[in-house]
Image (spheres, rainbow, N blue to C red):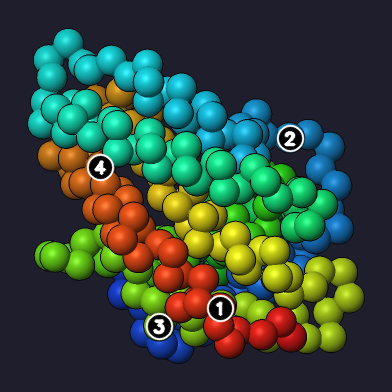
């Protein structure tokens, strides 16, 4: 409430205007530029996404339904093989890259429309930094893309709106013109971006399961979150290999 602007969206089913999408990409790039040379005195206990993926896989393997199981438990248990397969494929794709090929900085790690204040389609406030940590810059971009552009409705639930995501990426890259500390995403980051979007989905799925398991929450609400992530995995299995060209060809570094 200390920030001006309107709290227009949540992280569920946001549909930002083209101007809001463009401005959000600029804000994320400006944030990354602003924190690129920060060396924190401490660190978040949660590891980087590449090191977190094996933990997510372990958490899934050790999942125990609640004493009074719900549809959430049934859905998760029935789909564990599919989730674990996606987790393994994502980790295999990412771990072959030398981490020196992509920058690690302070990332927001929860950059979605619900954490932005908006006035006249301009982003005037960014908040909710409690998930921030040192991690791959391109993971922050991928997670933002998953939050902003994954559809939640009907048969399209779980599918990425690629044209909007592509616009977001173009603006993000262009914002780094003449910037000295941090450069636009490089070829390695762009090629691995689809797998980092898959990792982003698993990251949110892991939160969904942890929150459901540890808190007294509405099972129907969390079943919706679970099914959304499962629908993304299904979509990714069919269309994930087309993401590189769909998002980055002929997207150029600036």
Give percent across and percent down for residue 127. 55, 58
Q: Which residue is mark 3?
A: 163
- Mark 3 lies on a secondary structure that is helix
Q: Residue at x 23, y 35 (%)?
A: 79
Q: Picture coordinates of residue 44 (x, y %)?
A: 67, 34
Name which quarter of the figure residue 251 lies in: bottom right
Nearer the observer: mark 2 or 3; the answer is 3
Camera-near label (4 vs 2) is: 4
Q: Nearer the N terminus, badge 1 or badge 4?
A: 4
Instruction: Identify the mark at residue 248; answer none if there is no mark.
Output: 1
Q: Secondary structure at mark 4?
A: helix
- Horizontal relation, residue 129 to residue 148: left or right: right
Classify 10 Å Cα crowding around label 4: few (below 14), some (14-19), many (20 and above). many
Dot 1 and dot 2 residues touching (CB under 8 Å): no
Q: Which residue is mark 4?
A: 226
Q: CA distance from mark 1 to mark 2?
A: 32 Å
* Real-space Cα separation, disc 4 to disc 3, in angstroms: 25 Å
Relative to residue 43, is residue 227 drawn left or right? left
Q: Which residue is mark 2?
A: 43
Disc 4/disc 2 C-alpha distance (Å): 29 Å
**Rendering coords of residue 58 (x, y %):** 46, 22
At x 38%, y 33%, the residue is 84
Of discs 4 and 3, which sits in the foreground? 3
Q: Is residue 54 above or below residue 172?
A: above
Numbered badge on residue 36: none
In the displayed structure, 29 sits above or below 224; it is: below
């Amino acid at each position: 409430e200390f920030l001006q602007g309107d709290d227009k969206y949540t992280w569920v089913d946001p549909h930002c205007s083209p101007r809001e999408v463009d401005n959000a990409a600029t804000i994320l790039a400006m944030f990354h530029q602003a924190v690129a040379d920060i060396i924190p005195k401490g660190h978040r206990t949660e590891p980087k996404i590449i090191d977190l993926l094996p933990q997510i896989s372990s958490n899934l393997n050790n999942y125990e339904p609640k004493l009074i199981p719900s549809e959430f438990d049934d859905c998760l248990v029935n789909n564990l093989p599919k989730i674990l397969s996606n987790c393994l494929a994502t980790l295999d794709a990412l771990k072959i890259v030398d981490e020196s090929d992509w920058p690690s900085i302070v990332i927001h790690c929860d950059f979605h429309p619900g954490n932005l204040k908006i006035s006249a389609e301009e982003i005037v406030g960014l908040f909710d930094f409690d998930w921030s940590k040192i991690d791959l810059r391109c993971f922050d971009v991928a997670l933002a893309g998953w939050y902003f552009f994954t559809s939640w409705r009907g048969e399209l639930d779980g599918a990425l709106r690629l044209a909007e995501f592509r616009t977001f990426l173009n603006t993000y890259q262009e914002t780094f013109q003449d910037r000295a500390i941090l450069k636009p995403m490089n070829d390695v980051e762009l090629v691995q971006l689809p797998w980092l979007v898959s990792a982003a989905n698993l990251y949110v799925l892991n939160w969904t399961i942890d929150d459901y398991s540890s808190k007294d929450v509405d099972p129907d609400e969390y079943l919706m979150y679970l099914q959304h992530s499962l629908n993304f995995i299904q979509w990714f299995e069919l269309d994930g290999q087309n993401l590189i060209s769909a998002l980055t060809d002929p997207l150029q570094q600036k």
